[in-house]
């Protein structure tokens, strides 16, 4: 499973990128707002830092305007992936922009039927939002599983990008189901390294080592 980082925090992306943990980056208007940065400027900085696709989202709601914004975002760098919402206009924009050779991430997906339409419209990635479904007591993982089945049934090449990831269990479950990518905030990715028994075991090793009075260096 590829890891995308769901942030516009350049320092956080750089830290994970140095460890080989970053296969791409996703942003959205809320993430840009939180960064306090200019969208074109910060997105360019991220694109220069990472090799993989960097999703930048359009904010227009009419297809023609989305297409114009998408074309402008695509000029930022070669690795831009244009993000459009899963509306009828978003699907129109997806089709036009993907036919022009751009990578497209269709976002705000909450149903398998939406995912089916996005694949037909040429999406490179479909972003089902796990956490926001969990928030309303619908199991977001069921949606990932349904989309996996449907895409595999028909050989769709659109990649499933598990989004709105909030927990380390979301990461594990998305990987078990076979999501192609999961995008998560840096803190969630870093938390994947944590285990209480690792901490406890290390503590015991350190205590025993101190008793030997030895040094390695
Ligand atoms: C990523 O592409 C999405 O925009 C993001 O994962 C949404 O996450 P949220 O539901 O935590 O805002």
Image (cartoon, rainbow, N blue to C red):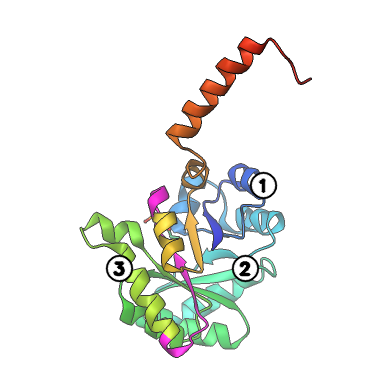
CB contact under 8 Å: marks 2 and 1: no
Is the N terminus in the top left, top right, bottom left or bottom right quadrant? bottom right
Q: Quadrant of ligand 1?
A: bottom left
* Distance (Cα) linking label 2 and label 1: 22 Å
| Rendering coords of residue 157 (x, y %) | 52, 83
Quarter of the image where one finds residue 172 = bottom left
Does residue 102 lie above or below 52 as drawn?
Answer: below
Report if residue 155 lies within the magenta region.
yes
* Distance (Cα) linking label 3 and label 1: 31 Å
| Rendering coords of residue 63 (x, y %) | 44, 82
Frontmost residue, 134 versus 172: 172
| Rendering coords of residue 167 (x, y %) | 39, 48
Seen at 66% across and 12% down, the residue is: 212
Say left or right for 71 vs 61. Answer: right
Q: Secondary structure at mark 2?
A: strand
> Disc number at residue 80?
2
Q: Earlier in the sequence, mark 2 or mark 1?
A: 1
Q: Secondary structure at mark 3?
A: helix
Q: Answer yes or no: is residue 62 visible.
A: no
* Distance (Cα) linking label 3 and label 2: 29 Å
| Residue assigned mark 3 | 142
Q: How many marks?
A: 3
Seen at 32% across and 82% down, the residue is: 113
> Disc number at residue 19?
1
Observer-side mark, 3 or 2, equals: 3
In magenta, the rendered stretch is 153-169
């Amino acid at each position: 499973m590829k890891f995308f980082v769901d942030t516009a925090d350049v320092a956080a992306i750089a830290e994970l990128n140095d460890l080989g943990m970053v296969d791409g980056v996703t942003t959205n208007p809320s993430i840009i707002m939180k960064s306090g940065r200019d969208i074109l400027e910060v997105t360019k900085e991220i694109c220069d830092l990472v090799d993989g696709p960097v999703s930048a989202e359009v904010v227009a709601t009419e297809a023609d305007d989305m297409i114009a914004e998408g074309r402008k975002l695509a000029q930022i760098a070669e690795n831009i992936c244009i993000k459009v919402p899963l509306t009828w206009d978003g699907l129109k924009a997806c089709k036009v922009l993907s036919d022009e050779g751009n990578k497209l991430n269709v976002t705000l997906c909450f149903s398998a039927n939406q995912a089916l339409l996005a694949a037909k419209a040429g999406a490179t990635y479909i972003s089902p939002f796990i956490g926001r479904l969990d928030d309303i007591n619908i199991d977001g993982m069921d949606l990932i599983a349904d989309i996996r089945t449907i895409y595999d049934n028909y050989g769709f090449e659109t990649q499933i990008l598990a989004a709105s990831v909030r927990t380390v269990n979301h990461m594990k479950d998305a990987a078990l189901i076979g999501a192609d990518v999961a995008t998560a905030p840096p803190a969630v990715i870093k938390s994947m390294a944590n285990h209480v028994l690792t901490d406890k075991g290390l503590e015991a090793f350190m205590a025993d080592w101190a008793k030997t009075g030895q040094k390695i260096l």
